[in-house]
Amino acid sequence: MKVKRLISLILIKFDQHYGISKTKYSIKRNKSDLITFIVILCALVPTVVAYSFLYFNMLKTTLETYTILNIQPLFLANFFVLAGFFGFFLGAFLLIGELFINKDMKLLLTLPLKPYEVILGKLSVILSDQMFISLILLLPSLIYFGVYTKQGFLYYLIFVIVFLFSQVFPMTLVLLYTLLTSKLFKKSNRRELLLYLSTIFLMVIFGLYLFLSGSNFSINMQNSNEIPNISINSDSTITKLARIYPPAFLAVKSLTSGIFLNLVWLLLFLGFHLSLLILTLYIGEKLYYSNYSSLIESKPLIRKSKTQENYYFFTKESTLEKSLLKREWQYFLKTPSFSVNGFSNVLAFPIILIVFGIIINNVELGLSNEIISTILQYKLFIVGFIATLASSINGLSYSCFSREGNLIKELKIIPVKVDQILRAKIKHIMQISSLGLISGLIIGTFLFKLNLYEFCGAVILAIIFNLFLNIIQMIIDASKPYLNWDNPQKAMKQNINGLLAVLLVFGVVAIMGFLIYKLVPLFDQYIILIILNLIFLIFSFFLWRYLKRKTVQLLSREL
């Protein structure tokens, strides 16, 4: 009976988290949702296939190198570390939303459930999301290793067990980190935001450490017509971590030892991870479940009417604009789909840049000094455009009204001006965008070694260009917002405005890049910078006025 109850709870959590029932109902009811789903699937499949060739080529090159060096086990250990690293940060973002933002705890406390069942139900959702990381990074390496080394049936049986437990250790670390960090911000009214920012800060620090620590990858480009041979260096930071990472050590021993020893190591692996699961449930019960009321004492659960709840942003102490900005942040943080997508969007491009920087630092591209000096002529604008792309693809601009959903009616009845609503929205968007902007500037400055004047010029260009692109994306959403969604995920990830916005951002940056390429040899770069910034400011001014008109039309129509 207890097992059935626990399984039912986990299945309900999965259904709620992934919106399975809602998606099925929506597809059956609305054929346009089915078409959208098919289009997204058709876009994903070619992307996965294209990157699969590069990824499997990396597996092949790395394993061949490690075989020559007689360190084959480190091949598997490296991918355990990579899966654990990405699993930790993904889990941290999701756990903050699941523990502190998701409101289902009030309902779960009233049900006849044991504390460990409630905690296990919540953590199962996090673990399932983390398993996608293992599915992408770890599973192909385990299969390829087995095929390459011609392993028997026992290897594949053990690797299934090892794979299923691969994210338990990261999940335990995530829970410890999140709960202990939340204790530090316990009395803050912005605890969720501070938790997100501290996680982002930790992620950026570790990424920069990998970037600055030296050679992590080797790239061989002997033939420019073939896929470059990429491999993980045997003396890299990743490999050094792999030697001391407990799950990697035990898993590799289980997979590569003799026929009897591997069973012994498998029992140790299972014992270690089952102990971690028990520890995780104990920590969750003691630090979260038992102290749930104290964890949210700064935000007591007071029953309010809908009218009261809608207007608690507006107090005597706050101005209208501050209250509207607070409203934007509250709705953003209180909806896990919005917060996770928003933060991940502005961090995705900087992470790609870090990987690109690591590759550039470790590959000989065969560029002549003349080509390098030509590229460096444009470094101010390159870094400015990098920071612009990192901050403009935020997912918030093109969904500024779509994310409102039914709450758009709230904006219609609040006695504030359209200009104040838009200023609050653009401030919120720029604040989130600043994470990508700062990360892009730091990484770009490291890559191209800007001096102080060039850095200041890149900062000004990125801020003004980002403002210009954000206003354009807001106009797109104000013209045709997607308001009738039943799952918050649809407002950002299944919004056709997102595709238009991404195409527009890359298109405008590409056009500006072409103009810069033609103009820099003819004029001084700082004169071009000043003129370009003035043009963006003038266009932003007129586009802002147009945005106000579109917003007035949106709020005046029947929704």
Image: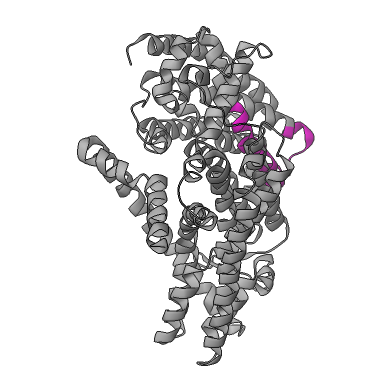
Name the side, left or right, on which 171 lies relative to 551: right
Return the x and y of residue 273 as percentages of the image width and height. 57, 71
Query: Can residue 524 be spotted in the picture?
Result: no
Q: Furthest-right residue in view?
A: 452
Name the side, left or right, on which 369 lies relative to 482: right
Q: Residue at x 51, y 23 (%)?
A: 304
* Main secondary-structure element of the magenta-colored stretch: helix
Q: Is residue 444 magenta?
A: yes
Q: Quadrant of the C terminus?
A: top left
Q: Is residue 400 magenta?
A: no
Using the image as rendered, state which of residue 195 and residue 201 is in the foreground: 195
Q: Magenta stretch: give its range.
A: 429-455
Q: Residue at x 70, y 39 (%)?
A: 186
Q: Is residue 20 above or below residue 101?
A: below
Return the x and y of residue 365 as percentages of the image width and height. 59, 58
Q: Is residue 242 above or below residue 210?
A: below
Query: What is the basis of the colouring in this image?
Result: one colour
